[in-house]
C-alpha cells in the first residue's frame, strides 16, 4: 500500500500528489444547496457539474441536484452567454426553482464570461420570471480551494439578498456556520434559538442533505434558508461568523453592505472554541448561555478526564479544511493529545499563524503546513510515526500502509456512516468526536493486546 | 396498446407527449428525437444520440476528460497519470471509478495516487508548460513509472499549452514513454469524445511497438475496465477454456501488455462504445479481427464463449468451451434458482453508460426481470441501432473536432488471421465486426430514451413504477427517495464482480436484497393514519 512513498522528502515545485483540497465550484454548489428551493448551476463544461454532484452524493448518500451550462468547444471559443441564457430558460420552465445560484468554473473564468451582465440581459429579455432570483459567485478553480468557493457563494448570497439600512429586528442575529455538515448547521440553529434569540443561519443544508425517506421525492426539500429570511439579514443586530476561511469574507461584506457588526470566531469544535462562540454572542446580545448547555459542557469535560489514559500524549496527524482543523487541533491539545503534523491543502498563511498561536507553549510545535498534500503528510509521519490519523477518507490508504488507527473527519467521507447525522460542533459535538477518537484507539488496543493483556474493563 | 407489464394504464406515446410538455418548445422538439417507443414490427427504428445536451436540463453526462483519463487511461496502474489543470479534475477522478488493479512482478502500483499540476492563477496567466514539464520530471524522479500520461483539462486548451510538445521533449530526455492527451472537458458532447481521443493515442503510440509473441488461442479484451473485479472473473473463465488473454484494455492494465497486443489472434470488444475505434484501427493496421462479446449474464457469457470457439474453429477448443459452459451453467443456474423465483416478473429500467444499459438486460432476463425502459448516457446511434449504421451517421461539428486517424495496413506487421473466405463467412454470421445494438433486444411497448434528463427520469418513475432502476450515483438516491431501489451500474454499489458466471450470482443476490429488503416497508409511518395505529397496537375502542 502506497509503496512508492518514501520517508525521504524531496522538494516538489510542480507536482501535486494526493491533494488535501479540491476546487472552488464544489464548495459553491454545497453552499447554494443551503438556500431553500435553490438550484445550483455550474457555468462550465458538463464534467464539472457531474463530478461535484457525484462527490457530494458519495459523501451524503442523498440526492444532489444541480444543472450545468454544458459548454462545448464553440462556447469555449465564443463565450458562454448563449449557454447560460438557454440554461435559465430550461431551468425555470422545467424545474421551477425560486433561486438559481450560478457559480463559474476554470473554463468560464478563463474565457472571462461576465455573469451579472448576462443575467441582467436575460432578466430584461424575460428569461428570468418575475419574483425569481438568479444569484452568482465567481469561483475560479485555479484559486483557493473548495472552502474558498463556499465562502464566495455565501458572499454572493449577501451580495444579492442583504439590504442596506434596514430597521434592526430585536434579537435577530445572523449565523454564518462556515463549511460544516448539515447536522452542524441544525445544531448551531438550535443552540442560538435556545438562548432566546432568532437565528438566521445561512447557508443551512439541514433538511436538504439529510431528508427522511417517506416514499415521496421532493426536488426542493423543505430545508435551506428561505429567501424571505435572507432578505432580512441586513435587519439582524449582529453576525456570528465561524471560520476565517469560510466565513470572514461574507461577514465583512455583510457588515459593509447591511451595517451588521460581526464577530469572527473559530468553528465551535471542542471546549474552548465553543466557549468563544457563546461568549461572542453573549457579549454582543446580552443573552445567556442555557443551563442545559453548561451541563453538556460539563459532561464533555468529564469525558476528557474519564478517558485521559487513552488520550494523553497520543501523537496525532490531522488534515482537512483549515477552519475545522484549527479547532480540532486545539480540542486535541486540550485533551492532552499531541498533534505532531497538521496540514491543509487550502492556501492561506493564517492557518499556520492561528495554529501556532493556539499551540504555543502547549507541546512540541508540530509540523504545520498550508497548501500541502497527503503525500507530504505521509512522508512526515514515516519519519515521525503517530498513534492516530484524523482526516477525510483519502487517509485510509496511509492508515493501512502505516497500520495506524484512523478517525474519519472532514470532507469527503466516502466510506463510513454518521458524518451527515451527528454534529461535531458545540459541547455535544465534542462528546461525539471524543467518543469516536477514544473508541478507535481502544479498538486498536484490544486488537493488539496479547491474550494475557486482553482486558474486560478499559 | 402498451405491453408494459408494470403499468397497463400507461400508453408510451402519451407518456412521451406528457413528458415533453415540461420543456420549452424548442427543447421539447430536440428531446423528442432522443426518445422512441419500441415497435418490433418496425425495422430500423431511429433515435438521435451523441448530440449536445440542452444547457440546464440536468443531464447524467460528464466530460471528455472523464472519458479519457477517468475511463480508458486511468486503469493502467503501473503508469503515473498527471492531470494538467486546476486541482478538481484530478481530485474527483482519484479512486472513484473502482477499476481494480493488482501490480505485476515489478511491483509498480500508482493506482492509489493522484497526480496533478494543480494550476494556479499565475500559471493560467503565464502558461503552464514549464510547470507541466517540471511535474513530469518530478513524477519520474520520485516514482519511476513504466510510462506517464498527461491529461489536459478545460483551461489548458484555452491558454494554449502545447502538451504534446512538452510530452515529446520529456520523453526524449527521460527515456520513458510520455503520452499526452488533449482531452479538455469541453470537447465533444460527453465522455465519449474522451474515449476516442484515448483510443487514438494508444493506437498510434503504444500498440504494436513491441512484438512479443502470444502463444495459443490468444485474445485481447477491449473495453473491460475491471470494475469490482469483472476482468478477473472473465479471465478465470477464459483460462479454464484454454484461452489466453494477451492484453485487457484497460482494466487491471499494465503498460507493457498493450505494446504487443497486436500479436494476439482476436480482439474481443466488451464496451463497444468506448473502444470500437481501437478495434477497427487494429484490424486495418494489423489484420486482427474483432468480435463483439457480452460477458454480463449467464446466457450472454456462454454465447460469447461460443463465438470465440467459432472463430478459432478448433474441435479441441470447442469441446473444452462446451464442457466449461456445461459445468459453470449447471452450478450457476442451481444457485440462481431461488433468486429467480423471487424476481420473476419484476420490472427494471436501465439508464446508464454507453454499453451497460444493454449488457445488463441479458443478465436481468436470466433472472426473470423485464426491462421496461432503457437508454444510454453517452452512446452513439450505432449502440442503439447496430454497427451496420455507422456509415449513415452524419458527423456534426462536435464530433468533427475529434480527430479520425487515417489508418493503413502496416508494411511488415499486417497479418490477416483468417482466409478471406472464412473472414467473410464469419462476418456474414455476425460473429465478427458486428454489434447489433440495444434496440432490437427491446420488446414492443418499451421506451428507449437517450441522455435521459432528471425531469424525464422522475416522470418515468412516477408513471411506470419499476421494481428496480439500474443507474448511476447521481440518480441513485433520487430514485430511492421514491421508495424504489436503484443499483449503481457504473460502480456496482462497491460490490462485484457482476461479470461471468460468478458475477451473475453476486448480482442476483444483490438485486434480490434490494427489492426485498424489509426496511422499505417502514417508509410509510403508522402515525399517518391514526386508526391503523390503534388497530396495530391492539387498543380497544
Image (tube, rainbow, N blue to C red):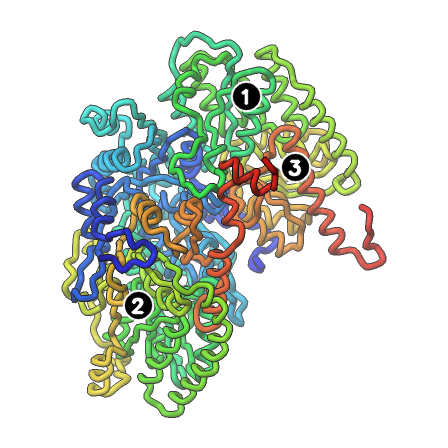
What x and y, as percent, mark residue B511? 46, 60
Mark 3: secondary structure: helix
Q: Residue at 30%, 73% (x, y): give it.
A: B292
What is the CA distance from the residue labelled 3 to the residue labelled 2? 54 Å
Q: Which residue is mark 1?
A: A264
Chain containing mark 2: B
Categorize mark 3 by other alpha carbons within 10 Å: few (<14), some (14-19), many (20+).
some
Mark 1: secondary structure: strand
Viewer-closest of A105 and B350? B350
What is the CA distance from the residue labelled 2 to the residue labelled 1? 57 Å
Q: Which residue is mark 3?
A: A432
Query: Which mark is nearer the camera, 1 or 3?
Result: 3
Residue A320 visible at all: no
Q: Are tags 2 and 1 found on a single chain?
A: no
Q: Which mark is residue A108?
A: none
Residue A107 visible at all: yes
Q: Is residue B98 above or below residue B388?
A: above
Quick one: quadrant of the N terminus of chain A? Answer: bottom right
Q: Are marks 3 and 2 in contact (CB under 8 Å)?
A: no
Q: Is residue B292 above or below residue A436?
A: below
What x and y, as percent, mark residue B202? 33, 65
Chain containing mark 3: A
Amino acid at each position: 500500500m502506497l509503496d512508492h512513498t518514501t520517508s525521504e522528502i524531496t522538494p516538489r515545485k510542480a507536482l501535486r500528489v494526493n491533494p488535501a483540497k479540491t476546487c472552488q465550484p464544489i464548495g459553491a454548489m454545497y453552499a447554494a444547496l443551503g438556500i431553500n428551493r435553490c438550484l445550483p448551476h455550474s457555468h462550465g463544461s458538463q464534467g464539472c457539474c457531474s463530478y461535484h454532484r457525484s462527490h457530494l452524493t458519495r459523501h451524503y448518500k442523498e440526492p444532489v441536484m444541480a444543472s450545468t451550462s454544458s459548454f462545448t468547444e464553440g462556447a469555449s471559443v465564443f463565450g458562454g452567454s448563449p449557454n447560460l441564457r438557454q440554461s435559465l430558460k430550461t431551468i425555470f420552465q422545467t424545474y421551477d426553482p425560486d433561486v438559481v445560484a450560478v457559480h463559474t468554473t476554470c473554463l468560464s473564468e478563463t474565457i472571462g464570461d461576465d455573469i451579472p451582465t448576462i443575467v441582467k440581459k436575460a432578466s430584461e429579455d424575460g428569461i428570468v420570471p418575475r419574483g425569481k432570483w438568479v444569484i452568482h459567485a465567481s469561483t475560479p478553480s485555479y484559486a483557493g480551494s473548495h472552502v474558498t468557493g463556499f465562502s464566495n457563494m455565501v458572499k454572493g448570497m449577501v451580495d444579492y439578498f442583504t439590504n442596506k439600512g434596514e430597521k434592526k429586528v430585536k434579537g435577530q442575529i445572523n449565523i454564518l456556520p462556515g463549511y460544516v455538515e448539515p447536522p452542524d448547521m441544525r445544531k448551531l440553529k438550535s443552540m442560538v434559538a435556545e438562548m432566546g434569540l432568532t437565528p438566521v443561519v445561512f447557508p443551512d443544508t439541514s433538511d436538504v442533505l439529510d431528508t427522511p425517506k417517506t416514499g415521496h421525492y421532493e426536488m426542493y426539500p423543505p430545508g435551506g434558508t428561505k429567501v424571505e429570511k435572507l432578505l432580512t439579514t441586513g435587519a439582524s443586530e449582529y453576525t456570528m461568523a465561524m471560520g476565517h476561511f469560510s466565513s470572514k469574507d461574507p461577514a465583512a461584506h455583510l457588515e459593509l453592505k447591511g451595517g451588521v457588526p460581526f464577530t469572527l470566531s473559530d468553528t465551535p469544535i471542542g471546549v474552548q472554541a465553543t466557549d468563544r462562540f457563546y461568549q461572542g454572542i453573549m457579549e454582543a446580545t446580552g443573552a445567556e448561555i442555557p443551563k442545559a448547555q453548561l451541563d453538556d459542557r460539563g459532561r464533555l469535560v468529564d469525558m476528557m478526564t474519564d478517558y485521559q489514559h487513552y488520550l494523553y500524549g497520543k501523537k496525532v496527524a490531522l488534515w482537512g479544511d483549515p477552519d475545522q482543523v484549527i479547532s480540532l487541533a486545539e480540542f486535541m491539545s486540550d485533551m492532552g493529545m499531541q498533534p505532531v503534523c497538521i496540514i491543509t491543502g487550502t492556501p492561506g498563511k493564517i492557518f499556520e499563524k492561528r495554529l501556532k498561536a493556539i499551540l504555543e507553549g502547549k507541546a512540541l510545535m508540530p509540523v504545520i503546513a498550508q497548501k500541502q498534500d497527503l503525500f507530504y503528510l505521509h512522508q512526515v509521519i514515516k519519519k515521525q510515526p503517530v498513534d492516530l490519523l484524523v482526516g477525510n477518507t483519502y487517509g485510509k490508504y496511509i492508515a493501512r500502509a502505516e497500520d495506524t488507527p484512523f478517525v474519519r473527519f472532514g470532507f469527503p467521507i466516502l466510506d463510513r456512516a454518521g458524518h451527515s447525522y451527528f454534529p461535531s460542533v458545540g459541547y455535544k459535538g465534542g462528546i461525539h468526536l471524543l467518543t469516536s477518537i477514544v473508541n478507535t484507539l481502544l479498538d486498536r488496543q484490544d486488537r493488539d493486546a496479547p491474550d494475557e493483556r486482553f482486558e474486560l474493563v478499559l | 396498446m402498451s405491453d408494459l407489464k408494470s403499468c397497463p394504464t400507461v400508453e408510451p406515446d402519451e407518456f412521451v407527449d406528457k413528458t415533453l410538455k415540461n420543456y420549452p418548445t424548442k427543447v421539447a422538439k430536440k428531446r423528442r428525437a432522443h426518445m422512441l417507443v419500441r415497435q418490433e414490427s418496425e425495422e430500423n427504428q431511429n433515435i438521435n444520440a451523441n448530440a449536445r445536451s440542452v444547457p440546464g436540463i440536468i443531464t447524467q453526462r460528464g466530460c471528455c476528460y472523464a472519458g479519457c483519463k477517468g475511463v480508458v487511461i486511468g486503469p493502467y496502474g503501473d503508469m503515473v497519470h498527471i492531470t494538467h489543470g486546476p486541482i478538481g479534475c484530478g481530485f474527483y477522478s482519484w479512486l472513484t471509478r473502482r477499476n481494480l488493479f493488482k501490480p505485476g512482478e515489478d511491483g509498480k502500483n500508482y493506482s492509489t495516487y493522484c497526480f496533478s499540476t494543480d494550476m494556479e492563477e499565475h500559471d493560467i496567466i503565464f502558461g503552464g508548460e514549464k510547470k507541466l514539464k517540471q511535474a513530469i520530471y518530478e513524477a519520474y524522479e520520485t516514482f519511476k513509472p513504466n510510462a506517464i500520461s498527461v491529461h489536459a483539462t478545460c483551461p489548458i486548451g484555452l491558454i494554449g499549452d502545447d502538451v504534446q510538445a512538452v510530452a515529446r521533449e520529456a520523453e526524449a530526455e527521460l527515456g520513458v514513454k510520455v503520452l499526452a492527451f488533449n482531452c479538455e472537458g469541453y470537447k465533444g458532447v460527453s465522455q465519449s469524445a474522451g474515449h476516442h481521443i484515448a483510443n487514438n493515442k494508444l493506437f498510434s503510440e503504444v500498440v504494436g511497438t513491441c512484438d512479443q509473441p502470444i502463444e495459443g488461442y490468444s485474445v485481447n479484451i477491449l473495453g473491460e475496465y475491471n470494475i469490482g473485479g469483472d476482468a478477473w472473473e472473465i479471465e478465470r473463465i477464459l483460462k479454464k477454456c484454454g484461452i489466453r488473454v494477451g492484453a485487457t484494455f484497460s482494466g487491471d492494465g499494465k503498460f507493457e501488455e498493450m505494446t504487443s497486443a497486436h500479436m494476439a489472434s482476436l480482439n474481443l470488444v466488451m464496451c463497444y462504445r468506448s473502444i470500437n475505434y481501437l478495434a477497427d484501427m487494429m484490424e486495418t493496421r494489423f489484420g486482427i479481427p474483432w468480435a463483439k462479446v457480452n460477458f454480463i449474464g449467464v446466457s450472454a457469457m456462454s454465447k460469447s464463449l461460443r463465438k470465440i470457439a467459432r472463430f478459432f474453429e478448433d474441435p479441441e477448443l470447442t469441446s473444452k468451451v462446451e464442457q466449461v459452459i456445461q459445468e459453470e451453467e449447471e452450478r450457476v443456474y442451481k444457485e440462481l434458482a431461488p433468486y429467480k423465483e423471487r424476481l420473476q416478473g419484476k420490472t427494471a429500467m436501465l439508464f446508464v453508460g454507453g454499453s451497460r444499459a444493454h449488457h445488463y438486460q441479458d443478465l436481468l432476463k436470466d433472472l426473470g426481470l423485464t426491462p421496461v425502459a432503457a437508454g444510454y448516457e453517452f452512446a452513439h446511434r450505432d449502440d442503439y441501432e447496430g454497427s451496420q449504421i455507422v456509415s449513415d451517421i452524419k458527423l456534426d461539428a462536435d464530433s468533427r473536432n475529434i480527430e479520425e486517424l487515417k489508418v493503413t495496413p502496416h508494411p511488415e506487421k499486417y497479418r490477416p488471421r483468417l482466409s478471406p473466405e472464412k473472414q467473410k463467412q464469419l462476418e456474414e454470421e455476425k460473429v465478427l465486426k458486428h454489434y447489433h445494438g440495444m434496440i432490437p433486444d427491446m420488446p414492443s411497448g418499451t421506451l428507449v430514451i437517450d441522455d435521459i434528463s432528471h425531469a424525464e427520469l422522475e416522470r418515468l418513475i412516477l408513471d411506470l413504477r419499476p421494481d428496480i432502476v439500474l443507474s448511476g450515483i447521481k440518480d441513485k438516491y433520487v430514485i430511492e427517495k421514491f421508495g424504489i431501489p436503484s443499483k449503481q451500474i457504473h460502480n456496482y454499489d462497491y460490490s462485484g464482480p457482476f461479470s461471468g458466471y460468478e458475477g451473475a450470482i453476486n448480482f442476483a443476490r444483490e438485486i434480490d436484497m434490494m427489492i426485498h429488503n424489509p426496511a422499505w416497508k417502514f417508509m410509510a409511518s403508522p402515525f399517518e393514519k391514526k386508526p391503523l395505529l390503534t388497530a396495530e397496537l391492539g387498543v380497544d375502542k
